[in-house]
Amino acid sequence: MEINSDFTARVVVHSDELDWQASPVKGVDRRMLDRIGGEVARATTIVRYAPGSRFSAHTHTGGEEFIVLDGVFQDEHGDFSAGTYVRNPPTTRHTPGSERGCTIFVKLWQFDMEDRNQFRKNMAEELGSPVNGVASAVLHEDDREIVTYYHLDAGATMSSNAEGGIEVLVIDGEITSGDDTLERNGWLRLPEGEGLSIKAGPDGARIWMKSGHLPFAQPPAV
């Protein structure tokens, strides 16, 4: 399966307009943003857990990172509330589920295979003081990518000319980028060489951004 697999193209997805698709696990549905592969895939997905749903224990051979968008995600390592950013690198193992239900934004098979840096962060607690209406936090940085989180006040602007491609998820609020307006759960991916310029809407915006990673995009090593 291939979805938005041309990493040289600009992609905009208004994910809340997509139909939910059933996963192999009852009660767990998903909206696929990009994907290369079948059930084992390099994938970027919004996943919804119904109350009481749970996967069986499994190992993330290619690593997993996710943001809890709403509700409480759970595994044997703890409870992860909305606003939590988690990195589970290659070889980590868990049994994910949610007693009360939750929605997460998750990326699979997009790690350096030697990465062993496992952590969780409350993104809002990482923010620095705002500058020109924009507060930011670096959540993760290595030789392949930089992951950041931003709070933009109403009407605030920001730009980036980061190398290696840029990817943005709108967690809350609204942004405009060129001719596109993205609201909550809107997703934007810019190819290498294309800069980002955005403006927050009247209620501001909270966004997650990753840059530098697209040259490393490839199918899972299975």
Image (cartoon, rainbow, N blue to C red):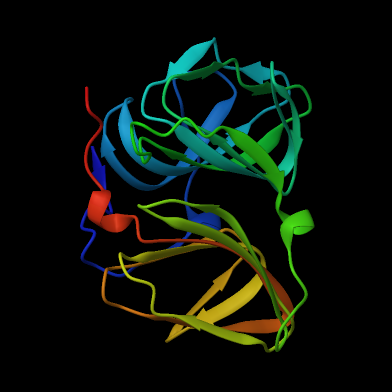
Task: Name the one closer to the observer, 220 or 172.
Answer: 220
**x, y (%) of residue 183?**
60, 69
Quadrant including the N terminus: top left
Q: Residue at x 58, y 78 (%)?
A: 175
- Is residue 117 placed above or below 129 in the rendered structure? above
Task: Name the one closer to the observer, 201 or 130.
Answer: 130
Number of numbered discs overlaid on the protein picture: 0
Res 12 seen here: no
**x, y (%) of residue 63?**
43, 31
Res 49 seen here: yes
Q: Residue at x 63, y 74 (%)?
A: 174
Residue 29 horizontal side relative to residue 1, left or right: right
Q: Residue at x 33, y 25 (%)?
A: 39
Quadrant including the C terminus: top left
Residue 37 horizontal side relative to residue 89, left or right: left
Task: Name the one closer to the observer, 27 or 12.
Answer: 12
**Residue 85, quarter of picture:** top right
- Is residue 222 placed above or below 186 in the rendered structure? above
Q: Residue furthest top?
A: 56
Residue 164 horizontal side relative to residue 150, left or right: left
Task: Name the one closer to the observer, 39 or 68.
Answer: 68
**x, y (%) of residue 24?**
44, 19
Q: Residue at x 42, y 34 (%)?
A: 115
**Residue 44, quarter of picture:** top left
- Is residue 104 placed above or below 214 in the rendered structure? above
**x, y (%) of residue 34?**
34, 49
